[in-house]
Image (tube, rainbow, N blue to C red):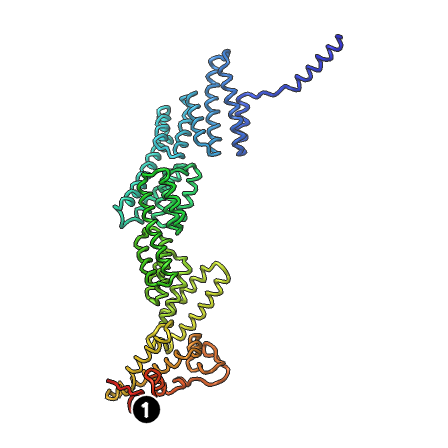
Amino acid sequence: TMNGEFGRDENHCDDMEEEEEVILTHAEHKAQGNELYKSKDYRGAIAHYTLAIEAAKSELEDADADEFVATETTSLLASYYGNRAAALTMILKYRDAIEDCDAALAVDPSFTKAYVRKAKLQMTLGDLDGAKKSFSLGMVRDPNDSAMLKQKEEVDTIKKRFGIASDMLEKVRSGKSSSFVRRDSTQALRQIEIVIAACPEMNEAGLIKVEALINLQRSEEAYALSTKLLRKGMSQNSTLLLLRARCLFNMGNLDDSLKHLRQILAGDPDNKPAFKLLKELRSLSKKKEEADTAYKSRNFEGARDCYSEALELCPADATAYKAKLYFNRGSANAALRNHEEVVKDCSSAIELDDEYVKAYMRRAASYLVQGGEAECESAIRDYEKASELAKTEEQERDINKKIRSAQVQLKRAKRKDFYKILGVSLDATDAEIKKAYRKLALKWHPDRHSNSTEEEKTKAEATFRDVNLAYEVLSDPVKKQRYDEGVEEQDLDNPHAQPGGMHSHGGGMGGMGGIDPDLLFQMFMQQQHGGMGGGSRRGGMPGGFHFG
């Protein structure tokens, strides 16, 4: 029995040895925490600093601890809180770190490092008044610390910069600096970026930067920053939501902008800025819908007028949306063949958005319709810019084809331009070509200048020939197409001729056209008036027509 009992006791002792754990002192936990901190394992460091804190607190609670040990341990405990605050800062837990600084100071009010660390954390969070107070308390303990004095002065400087940025934007909001929105917003942005560098977690500074960026028409940057602020717990902040609504609208997303505004008013029905913007955007949306409907139903004049009204309603800083409205009005003007207005509208759109490919393309087409040498050169530049901005190979190929056509037209514009001779645009209808020809042929017919000087007669005959040649080409669908493609004037009758004057054989128009000008004019007038009517060029007009 004794042997059995002895055996059980022996086994029991073995079990106790297996259960024994190595208990580290608070100093050893602190040392391990430091090693982990150096290796950037901040969470592991925090765990050991926490154990060091608990061990030191237990030691202080030991009734047998003498006064010397208690004083030394108290100082160490404060430093452990400071170490943990440093590790918490590295994982961005700033508020927890501030709590550790407070705990360190509660244990040891003379621990000046805790005042400095707390002040820096408060700066990071944007609590400038709190940071200044912490530096002041630290200087009470160490009045000769010049570094702390300098840091305290920096807090005052940052606070002044924040105030300047706020004041600049308030001037913009109130309309007191309507002529200097860009200047004041730029100043606000410069000041607030310095503030943010010192106070990276200051949400109020972030809001100011978002607003300044919007005022400077940098809405995409503003929207990206607003998204970061949302993730920092500001999803219910009505100021931020209003700024996001402005960003979305400025970027051309009216529907999502309206959603943000409704969200604000659902939680804050008395929010006047949100209500005002919602009302403006609803009116604008309605007017644009009217314009779109008119355009789709081919009421181009109505569409143009509605787009003009929408532009009047559109806020000045809504660059992307305003650019769309200018382009749409340009499209309506293009349908109305008001090409000078198309150029103006597309230029306005490009000024607001210099990567607006459609606007470059639309403006280039209208330049070509105008047809002058300068206009052709402008069209080529627009197409080249559009080609640079093209997002697909197919789009680039299509644009390059248009560039080649524009180059052909430029070459033609440097020579005799039949459209210009008749005073019609490149998109002129058959009826407009006939009308222009009749007017000019009657004006320059040699019979009308029989009593003029020899110089005037020569000019009239030359002009009459050009007018007839222009009409002969532009009234013939085949010749007109070949002329538009860039085939040389003298080669229009040669089916083998290529653009640019290249041909293998065959005759041409001989430079003056294949039909006698008088004969062409007689044929034209007979078609207009009916009957054959006789007479040569000098013997009166066909169809019984006489000059008055």
Numbered disc total: 1
State whether residue 137 is above or below residue 310: above
Looking at the image, the residue that sits furthest to the front is 531
Quadrant containing the C terminus is bottom left
At numbered mark 1, what does the secondary structure look like: helix, strand or loop? Answer: loop
Quadrant containing the N terminus is top right
Q: What residue appears at the point 30 percent right and 46 percent down from the top-left corner?
A: 184
Q: Nearer the viewer, residue 6 or 313?
A: 313
Residue placed under numbered mark 1 in the picture: 534
Q: Nearer the viewer, residue 538 or 15?
A: 538
Q: Is residue 69 left or right of residue 322?
A: right
Q: Nearer the viewer, residue 518 or 500?
A: 518
Identify the amino acid type marked 1: Gly
Q: What residue appears at the point 25 percent right and 46 percent down from the top-left corner?
A: 176
Q: Decide if residue 351 is in sight here.
A: no
Q: Nearer the viewer, residue 181 or 119?
A: 181
Q: Is residue 462 left or right of residue 78?
A: left
State whether residue 498 is above or below residue 138: below
Q: Decide if residue 238 is in sight here.
A: yes
Residue 200, quarter of picture: top left
The x, y position of residue 158, in whole percent, is 34, 37
The x, y position of residue 471, in whole percent, is 37, 80
Looking at the image, the residue that sits furthest to the top is 2
Q: Is residue 324 left or right of residue 85?
A: left
The x, y position of residue 87, in whole percent, is 49, 31
State whether residue 119 is above or below residue 298: above
State whether residue 485 is above or below residue 176: below
Other-residue count near label 1 (Cα within 10 Å), few / some / many at <14 / 14–19 / ≥20: some
